[in-house]
Image: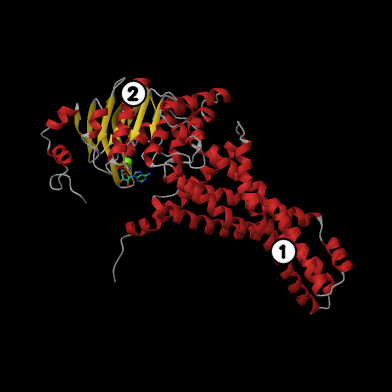
């Protein structure tokens, strides 16, 4: 059997650990600078609006479309499941609760990550490899303030707004399918929904959307900013950005749900 | 104006600069030549404080850019430097006009009328008027470099750094860029550093030449001295031979 010297073994374990720590450290330092930049004047309202347009407005249609069909599917599934307990009257509340608490924030976030996150990473990555970011610095303009801060802020603001659109359109989709196609009573659908949903559900949905918007902005900008050489570098950065954001959204979702439920139920 | 002393820089295991020292006097243009990948662009980024050297010291007009601990201090030093990047590095979401106006708006925060006036003057001076409202992707590389120069010149730099000003240009456009540099130099009287691998063309804009190889300056002096040098590395590079001390890996 081949023996491995302890030094080599420690090196083998140590190198990835060090690399991991270093990357995490760098991304947190990046985030710290970005947050400072958001609160440091001068405030560039125009740059923020441009990003709201790119991230928010341009995603509205696709988010609404997904919301509509998610709501519709939830109505069909909810009606089927609840019919086993003879409780189809609760379809409205089932649709609304699942959309508001879970599906709205998560699906909106995944959609925005796929659409706008990859675009942000590719855009900033190309600016990096074509030396545009170096050019900014050579002209004494802070690229984090000029490029990253408006994008991260726009992510934080746009995500909950898109999420609300998703939920409203989703409930509409659920209503159309539930009441129009499955023959549920319109009055019961709405009244059950209104009694079942309380402020906490809405607040937790919005809090999730804000956190997801923050993760989305942070990851997309950081991946673009640290993009490697050439077309391959942009390729890796973009893929990495979408994968990291999506996984992070789902992981954080679990913890956030647990924490929020604990906090509000006490 | 610029003084680089004993600068070392490596990326991971790869040593790029290994003790480089250079001086640029006021109103002088120094050409830094050397084969691709020796770290000429890295040297330029070190001078601009975009990268940090591992060891050594770089001062611009007597102020050390490496020891300037905050970005704010570095920005003060950078304010007198203009850069023309290798691929011009124009902002592709902005028109030519806005690209040139960018440093005046974002760095110097000048009032709108003055910005417009100065940009128009600059467009006129570099005969770029008809391109004012085009986007960088609609321009040829030669025009892009011209715009890149305009964007740097509008800041009225005392020091101008050129990274391979004629890479990606045909010989005619390349010659035009050199003539442009000479014209601008007469008008704006900057000192500078020209990075290039094009010899002897680059000699027409430079007062002195330094050759970089293997992380070190192997020869430095006026162009005539470089041409007469007995150093085999310099001779091989000048003649563009493939056999000699410079190996193509
Ligand atoms: N940010 C960086 N990270 C890692 N390696 C780099 C970086 N910038 C440059 N290098 C390496 O430094 C060497 C010199 O690059 P460069 O200065 O661009 O060469 P050139 O003399 O052609 O301008 C190259 O081998 C390149 O791989
Ligand atoms: Mg280069």
Above or below residue A182? Residue A162 is above
- Where is residue B215 shown, x and y percent of the image? 25, 39
Q: In which quarter of the image is ligand 1?
A: top left
Tell me if label 1 and label 2 are in contact, CB under 8 Å: no
- Where is residue A28 shown, x and y percent of the image? 53, 45
Above or below residue B240? Residue A256 is below
Callout 1: SS: helix
- Where is residue A245 shown, x and y percent of the image? 56, 56
Residue with the most extreme left position: B230
Count neighbours of disc 2 (C-alpha within 10 A) and say few if under 14, some if 14 to 19, many if 20 or more. Answer: some
Which is more foreground, mark 1 or mark 2? 2
Q: Which residue is nearer to you in this view: A226 or B137? A: B137
Residue with the most extreme front position: B130
Left or right: B155 in relation to B244 = right
Question: Chain under label 2?
Answer: B
Question: Chain under label 1?
Answer: A
Q: Mark 1 points at which residue?
A: A68
Count neighbours of disc 1 (C-alpha within 10 A) and say few if under 14, some if 14 to 19, many if 20 or more. Answer: many
Q: Mark 2 points at which residue?
A: B185
Q: Do labels 1 and 2 share a chain?
A: no
How many tags in the picture?
A: 2
**Residue A112 seen in render:** yes
At 72% from the left and 70% from the top, the residue drawn is A73
At 62% from the left and 41% from the top, the residue drawn is A48
Q: Quadrant of the N terminus of chain A?
A: bottom left
Q: Which picture quadrant has residue A96?
A: bottom right
């Amino acid at each position: 059997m081949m023996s491995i010297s302890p030094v080599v073994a420690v090196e083998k374990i140590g190198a990835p650990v060090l690399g991991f720590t270093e990357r995490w450290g760098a991304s947190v330092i990046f985030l710290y600078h970005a947050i400072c930049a958001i609160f440091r004047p001068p405030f560039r309202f125009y740059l923020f609006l441009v990003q709201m347009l790119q991230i928010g407005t341009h995603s509205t249609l696709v988010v609404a479309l997904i919301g509509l069909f998610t709501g519709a599917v939830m109505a069909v599934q909810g009606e089927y499941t609840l019919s086993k307990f003879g409780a189809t009257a609760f379809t409205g509340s089932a649709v609304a609760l699942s959309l508001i608490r879970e599906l709205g924030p998560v699906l909106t976030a995944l959609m925005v990550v796929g659409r706008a996150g990859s675009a942000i990473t590719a855009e900033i990555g190309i600016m990096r490899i074509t030396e545009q970011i170096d050019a900014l610095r050579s002209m004494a303009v802070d690229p984090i303030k000029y490029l990253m801060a408006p994008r991260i802020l726009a992510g934080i603001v746009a995500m909950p707004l898109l999420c609300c659109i998703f939920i409203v359109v989703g409930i509409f989709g659920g209503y159309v399918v539930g009441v129009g196609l499955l023959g549920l009573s319109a009055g019961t659908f709405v009244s059950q929904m209104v009694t079942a949903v309380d402020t906490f559900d809405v607040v937790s949905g919005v809090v999730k959307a804000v956190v997801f918007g923050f993760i989305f902005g942070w990851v997309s900008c950081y991946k673009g900013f640290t993009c490697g050489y050439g077309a391959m570098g942009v390729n890796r950065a973009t893929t990495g950005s979408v994968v990291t954001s999506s996984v992070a959204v789902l992981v954080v979702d679990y913890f956030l749900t647990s924490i929020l439920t604990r906090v509000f139920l006490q | 104006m610029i003084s680089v002393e004993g600068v070392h820089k490596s990326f991971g295991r790869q040593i790029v600069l290994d003790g480089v020292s250079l001086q640029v006097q006021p109103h002088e243009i120094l050409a830094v030549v050397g084969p691709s990948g020796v770290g000429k662009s890295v040297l330029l980024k070190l001078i601009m404080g975009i990268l940090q050297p591992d060891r050594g010291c770089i001062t611009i007009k007597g102020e050390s850019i490496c020891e300037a601990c905050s970005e704010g201090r570095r920005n003060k030093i950078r304010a007198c430097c203009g850069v023309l990047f290798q691929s011009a590095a124009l902002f592709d979401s902005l028109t030519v006009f806005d690209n040139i106006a960018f440093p005046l708006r974002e760095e110097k925060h000048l009032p709108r009328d003055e910005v417009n006036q100065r940009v128009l003057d600059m467009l006129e001076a570099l005969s770029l008027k008809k391109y004012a409202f085009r986007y960088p992707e609609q321009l040829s590389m030669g025009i892009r470099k011209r715009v890149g120069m305009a964007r740097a010149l509008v800041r009225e730099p005392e020091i101008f750094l050129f990274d391979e000003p004629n890479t990606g240009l045909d010989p005619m456009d390349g010659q035009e860029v050199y003539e442009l540099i000479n014209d601008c130099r007469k008008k704006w009287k900057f000192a500078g550093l020209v990075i290039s691998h094009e010899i002897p063309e680059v000699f027409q804009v430079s007062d002195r030449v330094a050759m970089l190889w293997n992380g070190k300056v192997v020869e430095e002096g006026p162009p005539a001295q470089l041409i007469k040098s007995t150093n085999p590395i310099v001779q091989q590079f000048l003649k563009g031979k493939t056999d000699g001390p410079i190996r193509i890996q």
